[in-house]
Image: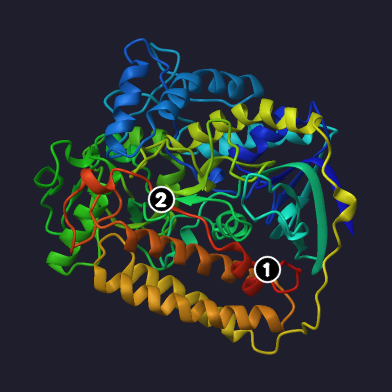
């Protein structure tokens, strides 16, 4: 089966839906999402979206806060673009029907989070992401020119380089034509072709054993694009959210940073506050500092968690400001208005990704990226809280003009694309390989490539991930693909890129802290780490069913 659209969007969070709404005026749109339409990281964003919406704030202050949190690796040109264009994009969301909390004396009730010098976080109580997702989905479903393909998962990109021997994959002459997609409800592969592809698949928190991310966050966009020759940068910078609820059944439920913004205090289990010993901003220090401080204190004391104490705040204030957090914690037996919450860090946000320009274009023509999957230069070595939704809105908007121009150029040779050939693959009779390797990858990443790293740990991780990749390759070759197989392959490649980035960077900066290189080294490492795979070899090894040049 061949599905043909002008614009193909992989992912259904804020980045993908924003782009879909803007380009559907110019051509047909297909949204590919591997779960239900609403299931994305955007849905779970509690804190809010950062933007200058108050007269007491300024563009320069937002830029300064972002740059300082990024530890010297932010690209100032795009930081200024995102901070400058953010308010207009938020007004568009409001026009679509998104409702942000209003202030008593100001237009908005603006929160404050770690690393911010001003109150600039727009929020809808503690369900901001869901409110944005709701408004975007309602608008998308009202469009006749947008088709939604739920429970479909990208397998591999189809590019010109796969058919033209004189074009090197990922080179300037290469172009994206479409992709093979697994309809995992019907368990069949479909061919989707188009003139423009936007990768908006979100992050990769499931690479780690403990994460605040939804189950969909398996690094799919990173792995799919990397296999096709897209450039990937700064994967060593993976942000760990400092405060996730510590409970065996909570699956690392996120306790928003805004709890600390409203006055919550981090304490040891004996009741002593500790953040002032680690940073002048105390509990509102940037996330890399707070996560590393909690990790340090837990290892020093031997405790399994620290405490987040909001009991000194008025009870009604907690219930009204954090209704979802309050209700969820009650379900696990914690009344946060009366007792401190046990919290631990968990993998939260990927600051590296597909390298894009200020219009979301990757190094492969017709392939764009936006949101957490991309590397725009906004976050540098550490993301400033609540800048993520901002990036998706701004970059997807900026991608529209260039994408529409490509649509109006000469068309891609879509008729030449063959449908998927499963070859001699058979149904699997040993699915335990998938579950075992999945667990092993997540544990080795948590233990060896987590909040604090060392050269020895990284070397161990590299050796093991290479062996696992070889096992996964063999399994992928022999058996028919499933959603679980594809996710395993993707988290393995994403993990390998994180490990390679961490091994390459011989310093400590932002989210990357190496005990053997504890200082920042501006002379040698105030730069991005960029990888572009030897594409011929990788395509052949990981997807031998597609014919490639020798």
Residue 50: x percent and y percent?
42, 29
The N terminus: image quadrant: bottom right
SS for dot 1: helix
Q: Residue 338 carries which label?
A: none
Residue 244: x percent and y percent?
36, 54
Q: Name the residue under label 2.
A: 234
Q: Is residue 3 toward the left or the right of residue 476 in the image? A: right
Nearer the observer: mark 1 or 2; the answer is 2
Vertical order, 174 against 395 (above or below):
below
Residue 404: x percent and y percent?
74, 29
SS for dot 2: loop
Q: To which quarter of the image does residue 208 belong?
A: bottom left
Q: Which of 58/76 is in front?
A: 76
Vertical order, 406 against 325 (above or below):
above
Vertical order, 314 against 544 (above or below):
above
Q: How far apart are marks 1 and 2 (CA)?
A: 27 Å
Q: Mark 1 points at which residue?
A: 483
Q: Is residue 121 toward the left or the right of residue 520 in the image? A: right
Q: Can residue 339 be seen in this view?
A: no
Q: How crowded is mark 1: few (under 14 residues within 10 Å), some or many (20 or more)?
A: some
The C terminus: image quadrant: bottom right
Residue 150: x percent and y percent?
75, 53
Q: To which quarter of the image does residue 526 belong?
A: top left
Residue at image point 19% right, 67% down: 303
Residue at image point 55% right, 55% down: 222
Q: Which of 152/47 is in front?
A: 152
- Point out the tag, 1 or 2, that comes first from the N-terminus: 2
């Amino acid at each position: 089966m061949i599905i043909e659209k002008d614009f193909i969007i992989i992912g259904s969070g804020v980045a993908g839906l924003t782009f879909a709404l803007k380009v559907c005026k110019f051509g047909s749109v297909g949204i590919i999402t591997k779960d239900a339409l609403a299931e994305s990281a955007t849905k779970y964003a509690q804190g809010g979206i950062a933007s200058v919406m108050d007269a007491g704030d300024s563009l320069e202050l937002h830029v300064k806060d972002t740059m300082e949190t990024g530890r010297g690796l932010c690209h100032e040109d795009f930081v200024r673009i995102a901070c400058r264009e953010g308010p207009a994009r938020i007004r568009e969301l409001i026009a679509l029907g998104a409702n942000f909390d209003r202030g008593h004396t100001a237009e908005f009730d603006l929160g404050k989070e770690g690393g911010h010098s001003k109150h600039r976080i727009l929020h809808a109580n503690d369900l901001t992401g869901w409110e944005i997702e709701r408004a975007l989905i309602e608008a998308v479903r009202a469009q006749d020119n947008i088709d939604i393909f739920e429970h479909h998962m990208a397998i591999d990109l189809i590019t010109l380089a796969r058919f033209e021997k004189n074009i090197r994959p990922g080179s300037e002459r290469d172009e994206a034509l479409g992709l093979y997609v697994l309809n995992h409800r019907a368990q069949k592969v479909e061919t989707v072709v188009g003139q423009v592809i936007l990768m908006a698949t979100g992050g990769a928190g499931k690479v780690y054993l403990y994460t605040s991310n939804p189950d969909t966050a398996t690094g799919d966009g990173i792995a799919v694009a990397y296999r096709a020759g897209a450039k990937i940068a700064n994967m060593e910078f993976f942000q760990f959210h400092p405060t996730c609820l510590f409970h065996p059944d909570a699956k690392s439920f996120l306790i928003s940073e805004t709890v600390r913004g409203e006055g919550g205090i981090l304490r040891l289990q004996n009741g002593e506050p500790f953040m002032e010993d680690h940073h002048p901003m105390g509990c509102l220090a940037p996330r890399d500092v707070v996560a590393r401080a909690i990790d340090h204190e837990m290892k020093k004391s031997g405790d399994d968690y620290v405490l987040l104490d909001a009991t000194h705040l008025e009870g009604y204030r907690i219930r009204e400001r954090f209704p979802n957090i309050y209700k969820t914690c009650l379900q696990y037996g914690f009344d946060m208005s009366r007792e401190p919450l046990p919290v631990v860090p968990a993998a939260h946000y990927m600051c590296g990704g597909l390298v894009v320009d200020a219009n979301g274009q990757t190094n492969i023509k017709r392939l764009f990226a936006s949101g957490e999957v991309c590397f725009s230069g906004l976050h540098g070595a550490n993301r400033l809280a609540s800048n993520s939704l901002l990036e998706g809105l701004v970059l997807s908007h900026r991608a529209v003009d260039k994408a529409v121009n490509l649509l109006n150029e000469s068309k891609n040779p879509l008729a030449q694309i063959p449908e998927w050939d499963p070859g001699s693959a058979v149904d699997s009779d040993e699915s335990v390989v998938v579950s075992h390797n999945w667990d092993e990858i997540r544990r080795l990443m948590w233990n060896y490539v987590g909040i604090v790293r060392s050269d020895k740990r990284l070397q161990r991780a590299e050796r093991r991930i290479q062996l696992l990749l070889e096992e996964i390759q063999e399994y992928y070759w022999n058996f028919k693909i499933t959603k679980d197989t594809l996710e395993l392959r993707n988290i393995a490649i994403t993990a390998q890129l994180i490990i390679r980035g961490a091994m390459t960077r011989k310093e400590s900066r932002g989210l990357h802290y190496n005990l053997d290189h504890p200082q920042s080294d501006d002379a040698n490492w105030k730069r991005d780490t960029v990888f572009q795979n030897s594409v011929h070899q990788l395509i052949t090894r990981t997807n031998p069913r597609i014919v490639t040049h020798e």
